[in-house]
Structures are given as C-alpha cells and as structure tokens.
Amino acid sequence: MQLSCKNKFYICKCNFVAIKNMKKSRNTLAKTKISDLLTQSKNALSHSEIHEFLDGFCDRVTIYRVLDRLIEEDFIHKIVTIDGLVKYAACHDCSTVKHHHNHIHFNCEQCSTVTCIEDVEPLFKLPERYKVNNVNFTVSGICPNCI
Amino acid sequence: MQLSCKNKFYICKCNFVAIKNMKKSRNTLAKTKISDLLTQSKNALSHSEIHEFLDGFCDRVTIYRVLDRLIEEDFIHKIVTIDGLVKYAACHDCSTVKHHHNHIHFNCEQCSTVTCIEDVEPLFKLPERYKVNNVNFTVSGICPNCI
DNA sequence: TTCTTAATGCAATTAAGTTGCAAAAATAAG
DNA sequence: CTTATTTTTGCAACTTAATTGCATTAAGAA
C-alpha cells in the first residue's frame, strides 16, 4: 500500500511503499517543514542547524525523531564526517525504484559545509562474502568557495 | 630530527620526522601499550574497547590524548562509521614516505567490528578545485564471519 | 464524529569527548 | 649522577549530542 502525502516532495520523490505490519508514518507539519528545508538546502544540514532554522517551531527531540523517519523512508540520508559531524541531506537523485546514496560527500575544513557530490560514484570491489548494506564516503579538504 | 623510540613498532614502522618547532612526543608506557594493542589487533578498536583492555592501567582521558598523538604521528588512523562509532586502527600498510589511509573500512552490523580492507582502494575523481586532505570510506553490512 | 495509533513536548538520563590544573614522569643539560 | 625543563598524566568538572519514558496531542481511518 502506498502512503498518501500532502507534501509535494513526498508525492513526487518518495512514493514509499510500506511493508506489511510496518507502522505507517504520518505527515505532520514538523515532518513537512524539515523535509522542505532539506530539499531546498544546497548543503547537508546538521541537527542543530535545522533546529536553529525552525526557530522554536518544535522540540529538539522531535527533530531527531522526524529525521529518523525520513531516513527510514529513504527520503534523506545521513552523513558522518571524520570529526564526528553528523549531517542530513535530501536524496535528490533517488527514484522510487532505486536509491543510491553511495555518492561522495565533501566536507570543507574551512567553512565546514558538507556537500553531496552526486555525480561521482566511487568504484570499489570488496573481497568475497562481504554483504554491503550501506556506504559512507566522505572526503574532507577545502571546497572551491574557500580556495 | 628523528624521534628515538624504544617501542619496536615505532622504530620499524613509523620513523616520525618532527617538523621544526613541533613539540616532541615522548614515549610513555601508556603510549607503548596502546600502540602495541592496536598493532596486534585484527580489527579497529574503539576508545572504550581500549579502555576495557587496559583495565585501569591509565585514565580515560590519557587514552584520548595518546590516540590523538598517535594520529598526529601517522601511526594510527581514525574511522567513523555511519552510526557515529569511532574506531582506531594501526597503519599496517604505511611506509615512512607514504601514508595511505584511503582504503575502505568495513563495519559489520552484526558483530559491529570494523576492519581495514587494506587492498581495496576506491577510485573516485572530484570536480575541479576541490582540495582533498583526508578521506573516510566506510561500508557497512555483514562480514564473512557473520554470514 | 469517534476511535485508534502515531507524533510530540518535556524532563531526565546516558554517553562521548574536552578542558584546566596540579602532580608525576621523560628527556635534555650540566 | 643530579638537576632542570617540558611533556604527560590523573582527577574533577564541564560541554555537547543523543536517547528514553511518559503523559498529552494530533493525524488519519472507520
């Protein structure tokens, strides 16, 4: 069964198909605001940046929980940089059928932005018998704006 | 000038050349124990795993500071998994002249070990004008032992 | 409109990592 | 070998990020 979504981004980008017995995610104002924010943002955002932007609209804890749901629904992905910075970004390149989050993320050491380098998919091949579920590729250095 | 090191692993693997005005790192018992532990370990270790292993030999804070020094000296490298797990691994493949930490790390979701896949270097090419200083490539899934 | 269940806010808690400072240890100098 | 210098350590306190439990509120189905 497909979730009905008032939020346009949900309708067009993320026709999430729920598995039997999976509890249905509801589309709340907080969820809509946060997904809109991430969709419109050029760079990945941290929890505190989102909190700051929403400016008291909802509780910090709610933001954590909404982000979890959006990840669960494959609408956003999570990025962890080498110094433990956690950021979230909308999945611009994902279709209903295939989600590919295995692109490189660039973390600028100067302005500390994290950007999805969507068109660069790293090539790698693991030894036999490793089952891959998820990848996290971050490269840190200096971005074009800060050079 | 070269640091004198009583620890055999330092002598053979990591002839650290200090830069002018850089403060000299001393070889203490804590540092020796921690580097030995990491060198002998098959998998990357977290701060708390090291703490547990040393079993009260030194303070938590000392472990953090020793790990910082070992990273500074390019003797170990730091790995951050997608769920924020921070682990440290000795640089087995590094030579005096070239350090390459840009191999893939595999994080097993079952047994939560982190292993360096030393012989797999991912290929990627960033757009112009990005200056790369550091990479963090982690792949999570199920390792051969847990399949 | 009512009912069921998910989402939220709040307070409290856990965990990871950092900082300042006095005491101890490692190395250099005499 | 002894003394002087500077790094390292331990301890306590602190900061920040994230999680949990629970009562209340709200979304969506009936």
Image (tube, coloured by chain):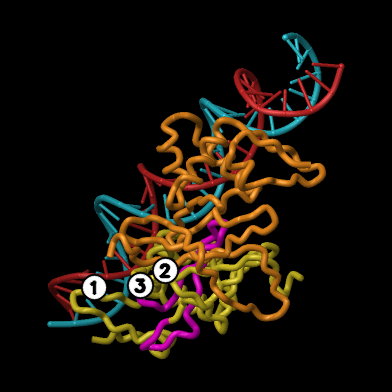
Chain colours: A yellow, B orange, C red, D cyan
Q: Where in the figure is residue A115, as x and y percent of width and height?
A: 59, 74
Prevailing secondary structure of the magenta residues: loop
User: Front-most of C21 and B114?
Assistant: B114
What residue would you read off at disc 3? A72
Residue type (three-letter) at the residue carrying disc 2: Leu
Mark 3 or 2: the one toward you: 3
Give the chain letter at badge 2.
Answer: A
Q: Earlier in the sequence, mark 1 or mark 3?
A: 1
Q: Earlier in the sequence, mark 1 or mark 2?
A: 1
Q: Where in the figure is residue D21, as x and y percent of width and height?
A: 26, 50
User: Front-most of B116 and A74?
Assistant: B116
Name the residue located 76 percent from the left edge and 70 percent from the top edge: A147
Name the quadrant containing residue A94.
bottom left
What residue would you read off at disc 1? A23
Q: Where in the figure is residue D3, as x and y percent of width and height?
A: 78, 12
What residue would you read off at disc 2? A67
Q: State whether discs 3 and 2 lie on one chain.
A: yes
